[in-house]
Amino acid sequence: MKPTNLFFTSFSLLLCVVIHGKVFANAAATDSHSFANVQDVRTTNLSLDLTVDFTRKQLSGYAEHQLQWLNPKATRFIVDTRALVVEKVQGLAADGQWSDIKYVLGIADPIKGQPLTMQLTPKVSTVRIFYHTTDGTTGLQWLSAMQTTEKKQPFLFSQSQAIHARSWIPLQDTPAVRLTYQAHIRTPKDLLAVMSADNSKNTERDGDYQFSMPQKVPAYLIALAVGDLHFKEMSEQTGIYAEKAWLDKAVYEFADTQKMIDVASKLYGEYHWGRYDLLILPSSFPFGGMENPRLSFITPTVITGDRSLVSLIAHELAHSWSGNLITNSSWNDLWINEGFTNFVENRLMREVYGDARADMEANLSYHELLRDMHGLSPLDTALRVDLTGRDPDDAFSLVPYVKGQLFLSWLEFKFGQARFDEFMAGYFGKHQFQSMDTKVFLQFLTEQLINKYPGVVTAQQIEQWVDKPGIPADAVVSQSDAFVKVEAQLKLWLTQEQPLRRLNTTKWTVHEWLHFINQLPRELSFAQLSELDEVYMFSSSLNAEIFVAWARLTIPQNYPPIFTPLRKFLLEVGRTKFVVPLYKELKANPEKSGWASAIYRDARAGYHPLTQSQIDKFLF
Ligand code: BES
Ligand code: ZN
């Protein structure tokens, strides 16, 4: 920091405590996970100018904020940062001159990071923050060439949700604020950069890329990836970005994407974002998918060759309405994003692939929810939660997803599908490009459905769903005829009426196999497990969902044949949903916890920082 800032430093350290106290109190109503003084001033447009340095694993450059002042008396602009080095801040005055702005980086909060407080008044409408990222950056994963599929070029990707955008861009990191953005990204010459913005499919690969996102998005939807990426079209509106090895496989796997867009637009109104492309990430990507606008980020673990896991695409696409168009105003209301999205996802799957598949998928996620809820405190099973003082990553569970979905399915059941479809289309139309919290949603629901059709549901029932723990007894859980048949076949084997080879499984899809594995007794003899493996080859399944379900069953039973493929899986795949439960099962087995730690020592460097921090918590 320059000497001119010293005065401001000591002065503001004192002042900041007081002022932060006030700012925090104001902001607490909306977003306790951000330091930004959004009541005073908001960024309306962000312009990034960044260089991607793979040798130093560093982004450096500047973030230019266009400001809209709401409070004429304000004297500061506070943004969120985490583990960033701020080099200087400049402001543009009305006379067109750039000048240095005094600033101070506050004390680091373990969850929120550091507030960057800049001393300026509404006279300044444009601010440039010069900075670079560090090893502590949680929102980026830098992969060496060896950690990619092709093993030729390094790879970089961002994952900003929930509060990691601040670790690679200094900004107001709250979903309550929306901005447009542009970016100028410099990379090594033969790599391609893509963003959650317009990606020109014919862009010259020259290491110099320009992006523009003309629609207002919340900070957590700003995304960047750089690698040896290639593009292939699926339809006029959709295409795949991937390393070469995945390109054709992904084009085949996700060929129905356009159909999904068409169905969703018909049900919920226009698709507002122009193109919809998919980016296939390396297998360390910590999530199944991330709904970055115009360019969903997708794990390669759903590329199975049989299109069995494409509900993930329906899910990320659904976010183009629920989440990206209408955005949870804080992480307390995550169900506004994920519950709606799970509901829309299932509706799209029903329209495109039929009732049987949609019923199976809804039923599988219901059972996953029950399993997940076992480990949760009752308070965390309400839809509306208060995460003040907690890291949103730690509070993550299936509750906002599946309980949210069940709530909407219950409303659909009560009011009838036609009325509920109309309600949903009205919701997306009326609130587009805005943020939404539970309270405003409930007002809209009351106006548009509850009061219009009196006597269908009571305020008490709604309160039960939204603010009370657990699942209401009259939840509408999809039953699957196909699963009833699976259970009947399984019973024939368990009661020794039929040997495995005689069971009728010829038409089973991945969903039926998953249900079959989930329904197996938790304790089986070695002979039974071997018989299952011999006939169905679960231990060598290339479908990650099946492999993981089988591994979770067999680890506690010390079933020897699982451990070689399991080691390979843990070294290759970093998707948190898979690896965290696997390490937990291993840790819980006294004979295997040492083995797990040894594997983790080798695998850790290949995992994303978010995955690492989750596993570090219980394995070391
Ligand atoms: N937006 C989420 C991922 C996310 C949520 C990241 C909260 C950080 C904080 C994404 O759309 C998602 O839900 N992914 C799921 C997909 C699944 C439920 C179909 C995943 O990654 O498994
Ligand atoms: Zn989602």
Image: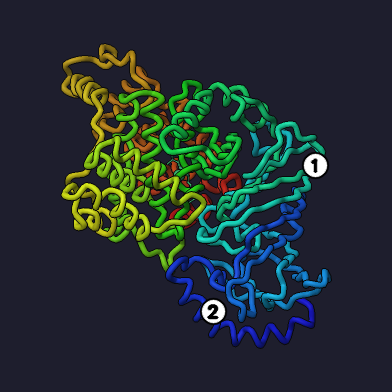
For the residue labelled by badge 2, is the local secondary structure a helix, a strand or a loop?
helix
Q: Are marks 1 and 2 in contact (CB under 8 Å)?
A: no
Residue 387 visible in the shown view? yes
Q: Residue at x 29, y 50 (%)?
A: 373
**Residue 458 location, quadrant:** bottom left
**Residue 85 location, quadrant:** bottom right
Q: Residue at x 53, y 53 (%)?
A: 161
**Is 331 or 159 nearer to us in this picture?**
331
The residue at label 1 has a CB less than 8 Å from ligand 1: no
Relative horizontal placement of residue 500, taking residue 108 as reference (left or right): left
- Residue 547 tag number: none
In the rendered image, the vertical position of residue 478 relative to residue 579, given as above or below: above
Residue at label 1? Answer: 207
The residue at label 2 has a CB less than 8 Å from ligand 1: no
- Packing grade of label 2 (10 A; few <14, some 14-19, many >=20) is some
* Residue type at the position of mark 1: Gly
For the residue labelled by badge 1, is the local secondary structure a helix, a strand or a loop?
loop
Residue 523 visible in the shown view? no
**Mark 1 to mark 2 CA distance (whole Å):** 41 Å
**Is 439 or 1 nearer to us in this picture?**
439
Question: x%, y% of residue 254?
Answer: 52, 26
* Residue type at the position of mark 2: His
Relative horizontal placement of residue 572, taking residue 512 as reference (left or right): right
Question: x%, y% of residue 472?
Answer: 20, 49
- Packing grade of label 1 (10 A; few <14, some 14-19, many >=20) is some
Question: x%, y% of residue 371?
Answer: 30, 44
**Is 507 or 334 nearer to us in this picture?**
334
**Is 544 or 596 nearer to us in this picture?**
544
**Residue 377 location, quadrant:** bottom left
Residue at label 2? Answer: 20
Q: Residue at x 43, y 25 (%)?
A: 308
